[in-house]
Image (spheres, rainbow, N blue to C red):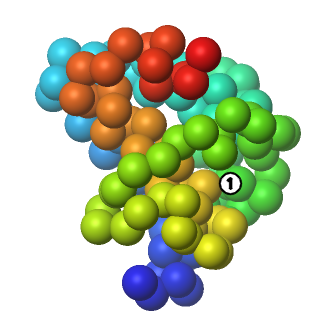
Amino acid sequence: MNKERVYALLFSSVYPLYIKKAETKGRTKEEVDTIIFWLTGYNKNTLQQQIDKKNNFQTFFAEAPKINPNAVKITGIICGYRIEEIEDELIKKIRYLDKLVDELAKGKKMEKILRT
């Protein structure tokens, strides 16, 4: 995995892909946002600021108000990697988000996705 390339990815360029993935499976942008708010502590305004600033994933997660402590309950395989075994903290957080959006697109209930 090319970490520098992943670190440099703009959140604002991936965010619409998360929404598209969810919407093609009958889910909504609001549900994607709920997942992001839960994981990162951002709210509607602060998320929009991140998008407007065109921050990369490294900055997006560095500026996140608070990573949800239940994020450690996100396990499994995403993009061929077992999340629990990822050592790089930034890559792990990106994969957390990928996994949550994937679960949404697969039709899981929001309570299960948000580990409540």
Which quadrant of the rendered structure holds the C terminus? Answer: top right
Tell me which residue sits at (35%, 56%) in the image.
77
Q: Residues within 10 Å of mark 1 (few under 14, many from 20)?
A: many
Asked which quadrant contains residue 81, the reply is bottom left
Q: Image point 15% across, 28% down: which residue?
A: 24
Quadrant for residue 115, please give it. top right
Q: State whether residue 49 appears in this view.
A: no
Residue 7 at x, y = what percent?
57, 74
- Name above or below for residue 67 compared with residue 41: below
Name the kind of residue labelled 1 in the image.
Answer: Phe
Q: Residue at x 78, y 58 (%)?
A: 62
Most foreground residue, 15 or 79: 79
State the residue lying farthest toward the left: 24
Residue 110 falls left or right of residue 20: right
Q: In the displayed structure, does residue 10 sit left or right of residue 78? A: right
Q: Disc count in the image?
A: 1
Residue 23 sits above or below residue 77 on the image: above
Compared to residue 7, the image places residue 69 above or below, namely above
Q: In which quarter of the view is residue 8 placed? A: bottom right
Q: Position of residue 15 (x, y in %)?
A: 44, 44
Instruction: Give residue 65's position: percent from left, percent from top.
Output: 84, 39
| Front residue of 22 and 14 | 22
- Mark 1 secondary-structure assignment: helix
The residue closer to the viewer here, 70 or 8, is 70
Q: Which residue is mark 1?
A: 60
**Residue 98 vertical placement versus 27 (above, below):** below
Q: In this rendering, does residue 96 appear at all?
A: yes
Q: Position of residue 111 (x, y in %)?
A: 49, 12
Which residue corresponds to the image point at 65% horizontal and 66% vertical from the top-left? 90
Quarter placement of the N terminus: bottom left
Instruction: Tell whether 15 sits left or right of 46.
Output: left
